[in-house]
Image (spheres, rainbow, N blue to C red):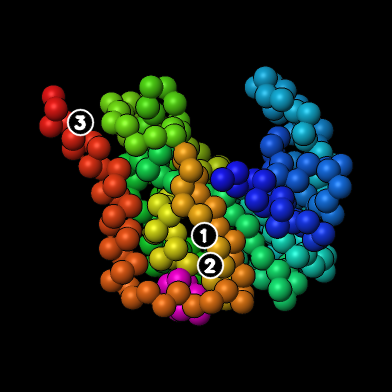
Amino acid sequence: MDFRAYIRHLGAGKRILEIGPSYNPIFPKGSGADIWVMDHAPKEELVAKYTAFGIDISQIGDVDFVTTDLSDVVAEGHAFDLIVASHLIEHATDIIEFFKNCESALSVSGKIALIVPDKRFSFDYFRPLSTPGQMIDAHLSGRKLHLGALYDYYSYFCRRDGQMAWWDKDAFDPEFIHSAATSREPLDRVLRTGEYEDAHEWVFTPASFRFIINELRQGEFMNFGIEEFFGSIGFEFMTTLSRTAPADLRSKKEQLLEVESDIWEVAQYRQIERASK
């Protein structure tokens, strides 16, 4: 399944907000879609930034909302039918606030389409899974900066054969590139300047993501539920969320055993590989 093609199908005839498309939008400007773009910098800065990295910049379009705060878009009174974000939700310092802002920016029947990295196939491999309680802490404290998660982002960071993400479950010899001292440097910089530095605040497997969404909805921290869910292809999975999604009737035991299975499914390959040595 092509996740991006599926999302383009969902967006047919709809008013769409794509958040953080950077140089690789799902809905390029000029594609015929009623697309509005929110990103951290205007087109000119994005072009200059990614040109320096030798990246194809041909798909970078005009940015309608130059901001990292969705509440700025909400304040302008816009209403969308579909909000799209690929590899963005894991960066949100306050994920509950993000969903609340999505609710304010969407029509009553509106949906969110998310493509999310699976920590089992990326540099986040060794990081512990995020929990609903951690997200509640972030929301109740009004978190705006990455702090402890910024340290973890560097401390746990690993590569496989020089790659930050991979497409299979094969065993690997992890390469760690940050010491405790270098992991602390960005945290100290944020504490000193108060300026935002980017990191993955949250890490998921497909099952852990589903569990978190169900818990936050049932705990009345947000109103979105999972409407559609597609397991990982390569290093990412996809979901659509809506306020009208049916309740997930699985027991907590079933959900958490599925989370455990996610981890074991990949970890067993490591055990087999170690046993063969």
- Three-letter code, disc 2: Ile
Q: Which label number is shown at residue 226?
A: 2
- SS for dot 2: strand
Question: Tag count in the figure?
Answer: 3
In this view of the protein, which residue sits in the foreground, 149 or 95?
95
- Span colored in magenta: 214-220
Residue positioned 54% across, 71% down in the render:
225
In the image, is residue 219 part of the stretch drawn in magenta?
yes
Mark 3 and mark 2: Cα distance apart in space = 36 Å
- SS for dot 3: helix
Residue positioned 71% across, 28% down in the render:
49
- Three-letter code, disc 1: Phe
- Give the residue at the far front of this rendering: 1
In the image, is residue 260 part of the stretch drawn in magenta?
no
Mark 3 and mark 1: Cα distance apart in space = 31 Å
Quarter of the picture holding the C terminus:
top left
Dot 3 corresponds to which residue? 273
Q: Which label number is shown at residue 229?
A: 1
Q: Is residue 52 above or below residue 168?
A: above
Whether pointer 1 and pointer 2 mark residues with C-beta atoms closer than 8 Å, the reply is: yes
Q: Residues within 10 Å of mark 3 (few under 14, many from 20)?
A: few
Q: Is any atom of residue 232 visible in this view?
A: yes
Task: Provide residue 28's location: percent of width, then percent of height.
Answer: 78, 41
In this view of the protein, which residue sits in the foreground, 248 or 88?
248
Q: Is residue 91 above or below residue 178?
A: below
- Three-letter code, disc 3: Glu
- SS for dot 1: strand
Q: Which label number is shown at residue 148?
A: none
